[in-house]
Image (spheres, grey):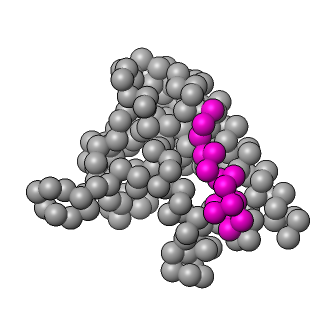
Amino acid sequence: MLKRFYGHFSTVTRHRYKVFVHCVKAGIIWRGLTHDLSKFSPTEFIPGVKYYQGTRSPNEREREIFGASRAWMHHKGRNRHHFEYWTDYSPVTKQVEPVKMPTVFVIEMFCDRVSASKIYGKDKYTDRSPLDYFLLVKSKRVIHPETSALLEKLLTMLAEKGEEATFAYIRNMDKKGMQY
């Protein structure tokens, strides 16, 4: 149990640090400082330790066992950089529909995905890894089309032009009024 505790704690901490570094490069420092703090809540941290494997999210294992992950439901409901947070009942369709994400949270989501690919991919990581993962399950996502298009654009830019060019582009994006 102690090994899983340290493994999970180390993974979360390394991931948060990488996201922070990327958010600084992207010009959204506050988002980097506050990124994923809910992972230290008992609702997320205890299952994280219990289902820690080191090669993928513990939420995937919890989902395999119980059919759902309470830790993930808690996490996505508190962290606006997840597209799953951005759903609501449509007054037109009377169904849950995706809502367009503010740009600052799409940028944080980009930083999160790149960092997660580096943490879990380790030596196998390339600048194409986050795009490949995005494309693998793209058709199964319930995400606003404009949000999906912006994230895919940034991930494609990373794959084709690298981090330096992508973060330069992101720093020049209009993020005014979006950080709430």
In the picture shown, does residue 103 fall above or below 48?
above
Is residue 135 visible in this depiction of the protein? no
User: Picture coordinates of residue 31 (x, y %)?
Assistant: 55, 33
State the quadrant of the C terminus: top left
* Label total for image: 0
Based on the displayed image, in which of its 4 quarters is residue 154 positioned? top left
Q: Residue at x 73, y 62 (%)?
A: 54
Left or right: residue 175 versus residue 38 is: left
User: Picture coordinates of residue 32 (x, y %)?
Assistant: 59, 33
In the picture shown, does residue 20 fall above or below 147?
above
Magenta residues: mostly which secondary structure?
helix
Q: Which residues are magenta?
A: 33-48
Is residue 102 visible in this depiction of the protein? yes
Q: Residue at x 81, y 65 (%)?
A: 4
In the picture shown, does residue 93 fall above or below 110?
below
User: Camera-side residue: 51 or 145?
Assistant: 51
Left or right: residue 41 versus residue 76 is: right
Q: Is residue 36 magenta?
A: yes
State the quadrant of the N terminus: bottom right
Based on the displayed image, in which of its 4 quarters is residue 22 positioned? top right
Q: Residue at x 32, y 59 (%)?
A: 142
The residue at the far right in this view is 2
Based on the displayed image, in which of its 4 quarters is residue 157 positioned? top left
